[in-house]
Amino acid sequence: DARVTQTPRHKVTEMGQEVTMRCQPILGHNTVFWYRQTMMQGLELLAYFRNRAPLDDSGMPKDRFSAEMPDATLATLKIQPSEPRDSAVYFCASGLRTAKLFFGSGTQLSVL
Amino acid sequence: SQKIEQNSEALNIQEGKTATLTCNYTNYSPAYLQWYRQDPGRGPVFLLLIRENEKEKRKERLKVTFDTTLKQSLFHITASQPADSATYLCAPLNNAGNMLTFGGGTRLMVKP
């Protein structure tokens, strides 16, 4: 079964450290999303790409977050420097346009 | 601003009954609306998509309605089972829009 792969599954780090999360979208999908989920805020859209080009990253704190797609098989989300308020589950999702997205299992991030 | 509202309180029902979940939206004119299911510790999973010109859509025990006048979608699970217990998320989307934003989700608990 085709699936979206995210690594790492869990990450514990100290405040101020750089965090890199990786996502391998499903082969052939041209749209990739990054979401953050917390109990308080639910699923928040951070950024998304179509055909590897960033279309919108208005939901992302620009001073510390960055998202890239170096190639069609890899999307990355970086936080530098990380802060405790960044603790959340980060999901990557891929699809053809915005219908029927397939989500990864997420990266559980804890910033101490 | 655009807003998506789902009942944040958990819905508790008895096995065998029909569960009905509500998704209301404001300042939106969605061309279609999607429903996803999310289990604890996992990413959301796509269930159904309904277009604005479709009043109702069914898939096995699931039924979705879409009322563009009321700006509301209803999600029904008939003959509910404990395995249906999960959080259900709705996501309206404009034809012209590219982003996919989600409601806060409603947790469904089906008791045996």
Image: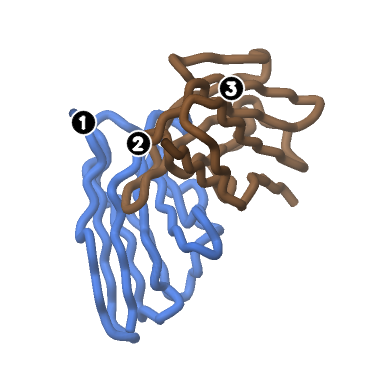
Chain colours: A blue, B brown
Task: Report the residue at 35% width, 77% height from top.
Answer: A80
Q: Give whichever of discs 1 and 2 has the lower sequence position.
A: 1
Quadrant housing the C terminus of chain B: top left
Which residue is tagged 1? A2
Q: Position of residue B13 (x, y in %)?
A: 54, 37
Do the residues under discs 2 and 3 have CB atoms within 8 angstroms? Answer: no
Give the amino acid type for the residue marked by disc 3 in the picture. Answer: Val
Badge 2 local density, few (<14 within 10 Å), some, or many (20+)?
many
Horizontal and vertical percent position of residue A107? 29, 59
Amino acid found under the numbered disc labelled 1? Ala
Mark 2 belongs to chain: A
The residue that label 2 is drawn on is A102
Dots 3, 1 in contact, CB < 8 A: no
Relative side of A18 to A43, left or right: left
Identified at 53% across, 30% down, the residue is B34
The reply, left or right, for residue A74 in relation to residue B32 is left
Of all residues shown, which one is farthest toward the front?
A: B112
Residue at mark 1: chain: A
Amino acid type of disc 2? Answer: Phe
Which mark identifies residue B64? 3
| Within-10-Å neighbours for mark 3: few <14, some 14–19, many 20+ | many
Q: Spatial distance from mark 1 to mark 2, Cα to Cα?
A: 9 Å
